[in-house]
Image: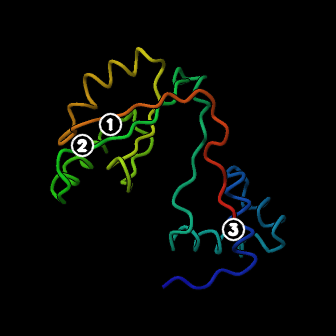
Amino acid sequence: MAGPLDRIDLKILRLLQNSGRLSNAELAETVGVSPATCHRRTQRLFDEGFIGEVRAMVAPRKVGKGALVMVGVVLDRSTPESFAAFERAIAKLKFVLDCHLVAGDFDYFLKIRVGDMEDFNRIHGDQLIALPGVRQTRTFFVMKEVVDNAPLDF
C-alpha cells in the first residue's frame, strides 16, 4: 500500500519531472538527503506507480514528424465490445501518440504525429478509417503548438 508523500518525495517528483537526466547524486544533493536515502525514495516512487517511466523527449521535426494532427473518432456502436475492439486495434498503431475515450461529440480523441499532410492522408485512408467500428472521423491539423506536454502542477 502506498504511503503518504512528504515534502522530500514531492520535491524528488518535481525535479525528475523537469529533468529526468538528474543523477541520483545530483538529486540527493538538491533535495538535501543522502544518496542512499534518495535512491530508496526514488525506487519507492517507481514501485508505487508515482513515476511510470523515464524517457527522452525527441524533437518531432528533427526526425521528420513535424505535423501534429488531432482526430476525433465516432464509432458506429457504443458497446463495450466495440470500444474494446477499437482500443485493441488503435494500440497497435505506432503513429498514434495518445488515444482518449471522451464524452461529447466524439467517442475517442487521437493525437497523431506525421511528416506532413500527404503522410496523414495516406494513413487516414489506409489505416484509420479501417479500424474496427469507425463510423466517422474529424481531423484537426495543429497550426501552432502553444503548450505541449507541460509538467504537472502539484
* Residue at the spot 28% in from the left edge and 32% down from the top edge: 128
- Number of the label disc, if any, that sits on residue 93: 1
- Number of the label disc, if any, that sits on residue 116: none
- Number of the label disc, if any, that sits on residue 154: 3
* Residue at the spot 63% in from the left edge and 30% down from the top edge: 144
Secondary structure of the residue carrying tag 2 is helix
Left or right of 69 on screen, residue 78: left
Looking at the picture, how far across and down is residue 51, in whole percent?
56, 63
Rendered image coloring scheme: rainbow
Secondary structure of the residue carrying tag 1 is loop
> How many callouts does the rendering have?
3
Q: Are marks 2 and 1 in contact (CB under 8 Å)?
A: yes
Q: Amino acid at mark 1?
A: Leu
Choose the circle earlier in sequence order: 3 or 2.
2
Q: Are marks 3 and 2 in contact (CB under 8 Å)?
A: no
Looking at the picture, how far across and down is residue 34, in whole percent?
79, 73
Q: Rate crowding at label 3 as few (under 14), some (14 to 19) or many (20 or more) other CA atoms within 10 Å.
A: few
Q: Amino acid at mark 2?
A: Ala
Left or right of 79 on screen, residue 122: right
**Residue at which label 2 appears:** 89
